[in-house]
Image: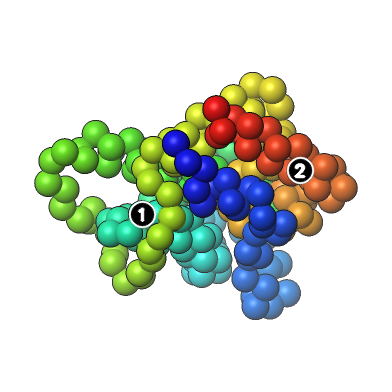
Amino acid sequence: MPLSSWKRFLDQRSDPMPMDEGASGRAREGITDLLHAHGAGDGDALDRLTPLVYDELRKIAHHQLAREPSGHTLQTTGLVHEAFVKLVGLNRIQLNDRAHFFALSARLMRQILTDYARRRRALKREPVGAVALDVDDETSGGPDLEEILDLDRALQGLAEVSSRSAQVVECRFFGGMTVEETGEALEISAATVKREWQVSRAWLNRALAR
């Protein structure tokens, strides 16, 4: 199978699209406060958090779906909604700050896209109606469903070698996080992120080539 856009990203892109930096310092502080409140057991904190993080999660989701095949039915808004549904069921996870929240979101995005690819592959010989999600975004191009699953399998293999390296890829590739944001989320230095990102790209290139 040719190494299309997934490999080109790993080969060529040195820094994925950063998160929205338009939010004010006050909004960022509010996000952190709500994440701390959620970690402390405030059941309503995620509801209050939603309007503060929605635009950034939407941007992350659009970043994912730009790699979906033309004519896909999973749209950006729906992907974000699914991520929040999953977050509500993750009350045992301590979300200590904004960076950790988006790192978790990146993992959810990966899970959602992989599950979606599996469903579409299972139904590819049958008529497939649109998923009951918003359809207000348009994306085109990108890898086929098999490539999504290939990347997920490669990341599983990478995680067996180094779980932290796999987390770096999740944050940077699936979450569109910068080196600094990834380091903050994983509590490692920016230099370590850069080193593990380079090693991970080489490892994934070899795995995808096979």
Q: Which mark is residue 198?
A: 2
For residue 48, above or below residue 182: below
Q: Quadrant of the C terminus?
A: top right
Q: Quadrant of residue 117?
A: top left
Please state if 26 lies on the left or on the right of 136 as rendered: right
Q: Amino acid at mark 2?
A: Gln
Q: Quadrant of the N terminus?
A: top left
Which x, y percent locates residue 125?
16, 38
Please state if 118 lies on the left or on the right of 13 as rendered: left
Name the one closer to the observer, 107 or 143: 143
Residue shown at 69% from the left, 22% from the top: 161
Helix or strand or loop: what does disc 1 sit on?
loop
Give the total number of marks visible in the rendering.
2
Q: Amino acid at mark 1?
A: Pro
For residue 169, above or below residue 73: above
Q: Does residue 104 appear anywhere in the picture?
A: no
Residue shown at 62% from the left, 71% from the top: 20
Please state if 111 lies on the left or on the right of 102 as rendered: left
Q: Quadrant of residue 168?
A: top right
Q: How is the image coloured?
A: rainbow
Residue shown at 33% from the left, 36% from the top: 118
Which x, y percent locates residue 90?
50, 39
Q: Which mark is residue 69?
A: 1
Q: Which mark is residue 183?
A: none
Which x, y percent locates residue 72?
30, 56
